[in-house]
Image (spheres, rainbow, N blue to C red):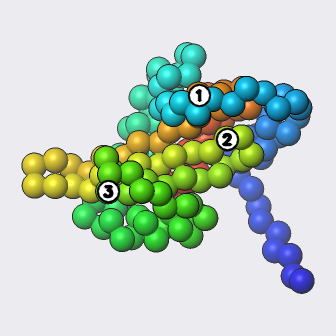
Amino acid sequence: MIFQVIKLSFSVEKSLYRYFVHSPQLPGEKSIKLVTFRAFAGAGPLFSKFSENTAKTIEQTFSDRLRAVEERCRQLFGMVGDDASYDLSVRFKALPKVPVIFQFNDKEASLPASSTLMSHASAENYLDKHLLAAVGTYINT
């Protein structure tokens, strides 16, 4: 078997370090409630920058290209789900206990494309708000 060495970005290295060193070692109470990054304590300003950079980039890049965004999600090992509220709903297993849910609606006659990244409310027990945003941004690469 051949292993490929992958150079990780600083954000990914920091996320993995934080997750493995500082996360609760015992299984904690897991929330199934999905929230946007805005719901995490003190994430308001970070959420605004995240929305401007990551969400807008996804929406502009994949507007009117639903099959392309779905293919990109599959390349990143996303599991396509069935949610009638969205044109595309994908679950990424970013880290154990930290799934990221990507929801995308393609543009329609009078509406632009829109996207949302969500996670379980308990995700902040494992990663801080900056690292949660980094995990979401990584999906956009």
Question: First in sequence: mark 2 or mark 1?
Answer: 2
- How far across and how far down the image is residue 47, in percent? 47, 29
Residue that carries the numbered disc 1 in the rendered image: 121
Q: Are marks 3 and 2 in contact (CB under 8 Å)?
A: no
State which quadrant residue 27 falls in: top right
Mark 1 residue type:
Ala
- Residue at 27% in and 56% down: 106
Quick check: 6 above or below 26? Answer: below
| Relative side of 54 to 79, left or right | left
Which mark identifies residue 87? 3
Which quadrant of the figure contains the N terminus? bottom right
- Secondary element at tag 3: loop
Residue 24 showing in the rendered view = yes
Identify the residue at horizontal 70%, vertical 52% (top origin).
9
Q: Is residue 44 left or right of residue 122?
A: left
Q: Earlier in the sequence, mark 3 or mark 2?
A: 3
Q: Say whether residue 18 is left or right of residue 31.
A: right
Between marks 3 and 1, how big is the CA–CA gap? 24 Å
| Res. 59 in view | no
Residue furthest bottom as drawn: 1
Q: Residue at x 78, y 27 (%)?
A: 28
Q: Which residue is mark 2?
A: 98
The x and y percentages for residue 92 are 59, 53
Q: CA distance from mark 3 to mark 2?
A: 23 Å
Q: Residues within 10 Å of mark 2 (few under 14, many from 20)?
A: many
Circle 3: residue type: Asp
Instruction: Give the secondary structure at mark 2.
Output: strand
Relative to 51, residue 60 above or below: below
Q: Earlier in the sequence, mark 3 or mark 1?
A: 3
Amino acid beneath label 2: Val
